[in-house]
Image: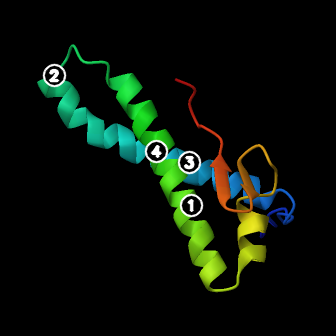
C-alpha cells in the first residue's frame, strides 16, 4: 500500500524554502561560535551570532540578486526571495533586506 504525499503548491513553497535556508544559516553561525564560546565564556555570544546571521543573510541575498540579474533571471529571484516586501525590497540602486534578528 503506497502513501501519496500531498502536492506542494508553488505559492507556499518559496516561504518554506526561505525558512529552511535561514535555519541552515543560523545553524552554521552557531556552530562557528561554539568554539569561541568555550574559550571565552563571558562574552555575549548570542549577540555575535545575531549580528553575524544578519550580515550573512544580507550579503548572500545581495549576491544572489546580482547573480540572477547578471544571468537575466530576476523572475527567479522575485519568486523565491522577494515574494513579499517584508523580506527583500528592491528599488533602483538599493537592495534592502529585513533583519532576521533585531539587535
14 up-or-down from 54: above or below: below
Residue placed farthest to the top in the image?
Answer: 42
Gap in angstroms between the C-alphas marked 2 and 3: 26 Å
Q: Residues within 10 Å of mark 4 (few under 14, many from 20)?
A: some
Q: CA distance from mark 2 to mark 4?
A: 22 Å
| Residue for badge 3 | 22
Q: At 58% across and 72% down in the image, what residue appears?
A: 66
Q: Report the residue at 71% width, 69% height from top.
A: 77
Q: Position of residue 41 (x, y in %)?
A: 19, 17
> Badge 2, how many Cα within 10 Å: few under 14, some, many 20+?
few
Q: Which mark is residue 55?
A: 4
| Residue 44 drawn above or below residue 13 | above
Measured from the top left, where is residue 40 in percent x and y? 16, 22
Q: From what the image shows, is residue 66 above or below residue 43?
A: below
Which residue does the image show at 82% across and 51% down from the upper left? 84
Q: Which residue is mark 1?
A: 62
Distance Cα–Cα, label 4 vs label 3: 12 Å
Q: Nearer the viewer, mark 1 or mark 3?
A: 1
Point out the frontmost of discs 4 and 3.
4
- Judge by depth and name the residue closer to the eye, 56 or 30: 56
Sequence-wise, the earlier of marks 2 and 3 is 3
Using the rendered view, name the quadrant where residue 94 is placed: bottom right
Mark seen at residue 28 = none
Q: Which mark is residue 40?
A: 2
What's the CA distance linking mark 1 and mark 4?
A: 11 Å
Amino acid at each position: 500500500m503506497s502513501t501519496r504525499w500531498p502536492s506542494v503548491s508553488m505559492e507556499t513553497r518559496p516561504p518554506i524554502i526561505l525558512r529552511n535556508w535561514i535555519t541552515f544559516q543560523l545553524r552554521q553561525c552557531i556552530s562557528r561560535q561554539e568554539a569561541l564560546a568555550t574559550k571565552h565564556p563571558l562574552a555575549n555570544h548570542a549577540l555575535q551570532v545575531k549580528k553575524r546571521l544578519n550580515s550573512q543573510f544580507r550579503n548572500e541575498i545581495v549576491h544572489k540578486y546580482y547573480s540572477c540579474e547578471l544571468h537575466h533571471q530576476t523572475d527567479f529571484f522575485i519568486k523565491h526571495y522577494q515574494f513579499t516586501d517584508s523580506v527583500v525590497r528592491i528599488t533602483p540602486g538599493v537592495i534592502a533586506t529585513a533583519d532576521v534578528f533585531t539587535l
